[in-house]
């Protein structure tokens, strides 16, 4: 290898899938997916979301894995090794920017989760009003910030222990446990009186609620949930063994991720309707809905504690991938010592992250394009930076200098036959780029058009 230094690889087949799924499955599935679905019309959102996972998400993930495994490095260095002397490495840089923006509000929500771990029994009590509890908490100028910092420190400690030792071991045991707990909560939620309306909201197609804005959110959600478009899956690809089938790995990761998101919807929406919560409540939705379910369960406090601990772990395995992306970038690209790369990441994330957290309370007056900082970071990362990064990654392997390595990586240098290769190539060349451009630009054109029509 070019650097002469051997890279950690994931030990087993399950290890790769568990680690990539550990990155993919996180707050995106359990916190963001339900609230985006609730705010964008329910079933209509779900249908286009699923379409995006299969048409855009899986091919883009395969592309990312291929770039990383061929380049044997983080996103930026992988681009420069495959296409030396070109500007493609900037895609990696863009990705790091996106990773940092995501981390800043991701750690806010992870911090909320820690608060709910600490107060798991309190929030599950039937005489505590979940929405008052949540709004008091996020408006507090100190507590959410302290939890956020606690979470960031926790993540750094895990990142410090290296890839296979840290991530693989934890994901393998705890993710299946989270899945089991979600299934139990789904059963409880579906049995709630009035819960049926929630299932209908989620599954009974009603395309009258479909909008371009909803489609943009669904696309952003697909990228966010699969950890795509910012080089994280490229970095992970560099840790996948040469003998592994990349297409299958991507398919398994995407299926696991999507299953968990749908189950999170089945857990949340029956309760949303049973308790008369507004489905479009936004980022608070899950944190006000779940305590309602716990308060109606035998041993609700115990379930509450277990759930928020596992959700913290899920957030942690995702946050690790976000941190690892920028730590690896600073370390390998800027030739920094890992510890300094980590401290630099820490400093940047705090600088952006604390204002994002406070924008839910005292700093809510700071508005960018009509959004508070938290929503703004969420919007520009998921709906602009990731689709743009995804577009460039896809173009790199479909039309750009990554064309040859792409075929070699997918077939493991000709050792395996990938039956879907033609379909994937077709999607990556034509469908994915067109779709990303249309969905990103349509809301812009529509608003211009509307502006003119109104004038
Ligand atoms: N996919 C994660 C989630 O759903 C979030 C995440 C982790 C992420 N790493 C990422 C999103 C990289 C985009 C890119 O919670």
Image: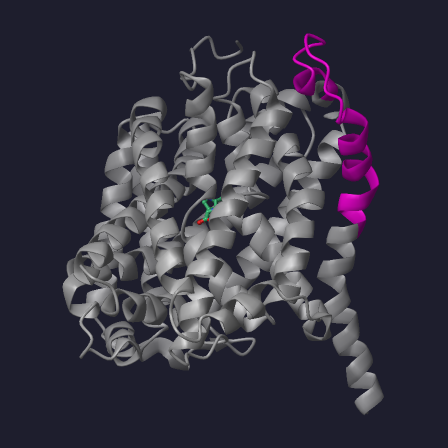
Is residue 326 found left or right of 346 in the rendered image?
right
Q: Quadrant of residue 143?
A: bottom left
426 magenta-colored: yes
Image point (35%, 27%), residue name: 168
Residue extending farthest bottom: 455
Q: Nearer the viewer, residue 449 or 247?
A: 247
Is residue 18 found left or right of 398 in the rendered image?
left
18 magenta-colored: no
Image point (51%, 46%), residue name: 259
**Residue 239 visible in image:** yes
Query: Which x, y percent locates residue 147?
Result: 22, 58
**What segment is highlighted magenta in the picture?**
407-434
Image point (65%, 13%), residue name: 412
Is residue 326 found left or right of 227 in the rendered image?
left
Quarter containing the C terminus: bottom right
* Dominant secondary structure, magenta: helix
Query: Which x, y percent locates residue 430?
Result: 83, 42
- Image: 231 above or below 245: below
Query: Which x, y percent locates residue 266?
Result: 47, 59
**Residue 101 visible in image:** no
Q: Total of numbered circles in the picture?
A: 0
Q: Nearer the viewer, residue 351 or 297?
A: 297
Image point (76%, 25%), residue name: 421
Query: Which x, y percent locates residue 317?
Result: 36, 40
Q: Nearer the viewer, residue 452 or 267?
A: 267
Q: Nearer the viewer, residue 279 or 140?
A: 279
Q: Quadrant of residue 91?
A: top right
Is residue 49 found left or right of 127 in the rendered image?
right
């Amino acid at each position: 290898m070019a650097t002469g230094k051997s890279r950690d690889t994931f030990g087993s087949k399950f290890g790769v899938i568990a680690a990539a799924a550990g990155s993919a499955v996180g707050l995106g599935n359990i916190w963001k997916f339900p609230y985006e679905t609730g705010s964008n019309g329910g079933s209509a959102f779900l249908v286009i979301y699923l379409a995006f996972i299969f048409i855009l998400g899986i091919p883009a993930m395969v592309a990312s894995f291929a770039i990383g495994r061929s380049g044997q490095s983080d996103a930026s260095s992988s681009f420069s090794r495959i296409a030396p002397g070109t500007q493609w490495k900037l895609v990696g840089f863009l990705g790091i920017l996106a990773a940092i923006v995501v981390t800043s509000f991701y750690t806010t929500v992870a911090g909320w989760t820690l608060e709910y771990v600490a107060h798991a029994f309190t929030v599950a009590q039937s005489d505590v009003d979940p929405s008052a509890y949540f709004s008091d908490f996020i408006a507090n100028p100190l507590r959410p910030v302290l939890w956020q910092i606690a979470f960031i420190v926790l993540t750094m400690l895990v990142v410090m222990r290296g890839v296979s030792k840290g991530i693989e071991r934890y994901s393998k045991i705890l993710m299946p446990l989270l899945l089991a707990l979600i299934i139990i909560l789904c059963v409880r939620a579906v049995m709630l009186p009035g819960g049926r309306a929630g299932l209908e909201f989620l599954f009974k197609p009603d395309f009258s609620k479909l909008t371009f804005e909803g489609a943009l959110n669904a696309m952003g959600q697909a990228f966010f949930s699969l950890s795509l478009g910012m080089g994280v899956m490229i970095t992970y690809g560099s840790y996948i063994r040469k003998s592994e089938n990349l297409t299958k790995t991507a398919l398994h990761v995407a299926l696991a991720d999507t299953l968990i998101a749908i189950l999170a919807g089945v857990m949340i929406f029956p309760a949303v309707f049973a308790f008369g919560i507004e489905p479009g409540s936004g980022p608070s939705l899950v944190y006000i809905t779940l305590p309602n379910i716990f308060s109606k369960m035998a041993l609700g406090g115990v379930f509450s504690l277990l759930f928020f601990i596992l959700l913290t772990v899920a957030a942690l395995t995702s946050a690790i991938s976000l941190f690892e992306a920028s730590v690896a970038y600073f370390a390998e690209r800027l030739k920094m010592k890992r510890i300094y790369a980590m401290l630099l990441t820490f400093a940047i994330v705090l600088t952006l992250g604390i204002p994002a957290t406070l924008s839910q309370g005292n700093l809510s007056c700071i508005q960018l394009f009509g959004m508070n900082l938290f929503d703004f970071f969420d919007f520009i990362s998921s709906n602009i930076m990731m689709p743009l990064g995804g577009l460039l990654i896809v173009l790199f392997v479909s039309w750009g200098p990554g064309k040859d390595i792409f075929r070699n990586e997918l077939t493991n240098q000709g050792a395996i036959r990938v039956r879907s290769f033609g379909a994937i190539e077709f999607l990556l060349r034509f469908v994915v780029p067109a779709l990303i451009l249309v969905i990103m630009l349509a809301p812009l054109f529509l608003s211009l058009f509307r502006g003119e029509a109104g004038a």
